[in-house]
Amino acid sequence: MKNIYIVLGHYLYKNTKISNILKKRLNKCIEKASINDIIIVAGGNPAKQKHTEAYMMKKYILQHLNNKNIILENKSNTTIENFININKILKLINMKKINNINVITSKFHMPKAKRISKKYNYNFKFIEV
């Protein structure tokens, strides 16, 4: 059995530098996930940077964790769009082999993410950073 870790994005600084808020979310994922777990990094390009949040998130994780199961959700610019697109990805995964679906986000973002996630038929567990 494996777990899914969904890391919700946060805006990038100029030159696609990862914000401190996003770094905390990614570090929590690196701390919790094993190399066999599935990681979904969620974030598009609302600031019109060179790369999407998801691309930079994957790049950061790979510097710290050798995980070949990182899926990019790089179309979203809002939390609502994140969950719409995450739902599409989750439908493609064999849930019989999944233990938990964990959503990692910041304390201030948690109420919004929980409220939006209720529209979907998954038992999301939330990990606050």
Image (cartoon, rainbow, N blue to C red):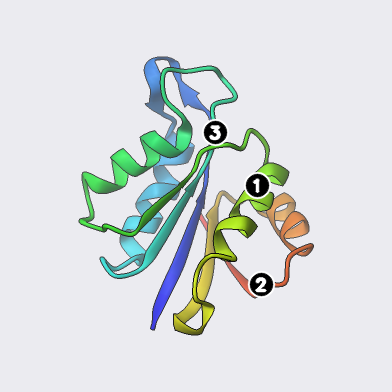
Residue 90 image point, x, y percent: 56, 64
* Local secondary structure at mark 3: loop
Crowding near pointer 3: few (<14 within 10 Å), some, many (20+)?
A: many
Name the residue type under label 2.
Tyr
Q: Nearer the viewer, residue 94 or 11?
A: 94
Name the residue type under label 3.
Gly
Residue 127, visible in the rendered structure: no
Q: Determine which quarter of the picture holds residue 66.
A: bottom left
Crowding near pointer 2: few (<14 within 10 Å), some, many (20+)?
A: few
**Residue 129, placed above or below residue 119:** above
Q: Which of the numbered marks, if any, corresponds to residue 29?
A: none
How far apart are the alpha carbons under marks 3 and 1? Answer: 17 Å
Image point (32%, 61%), residue name:
31
* Residue assigned mark 3: 44
* Local secondary structure at mark 2: loop
Q: Of label 1 and label 2, which has the lower sequence position? A: 1
User: Of tags 3 and 1, which is closer to the observer?
Assistant: 3
Q: Which of the numbered marks, if any, corresponds to residue 122?
A: 2
Image point (57%, 36%), residue name:
75
* Residue assigned mark 1: 109
Instruction: Give the quarter of the figure containing the N terminus.
Output: bottom left
Q: Of label 3 and label 1, which has the lower sequence position? A: 3
Q: Nearer the viewer, residue 47 or 110?
A: 47
How far apart are the alpha carbons under marks 1 and 2? Answer: 19 Å
Residue 123 image point, x, y percent: 65, 75
Residue 117 image point, x, y percent: 71, 60
**Residue 53, placed above or below residue 37:** above
Locate residue 9 relative to residue 35 in the image: left or right: right
Image point (76%, 55%), residue name:
116
How far apart are the alpha carbons under marks 3 and 2? Answer: 23 Å
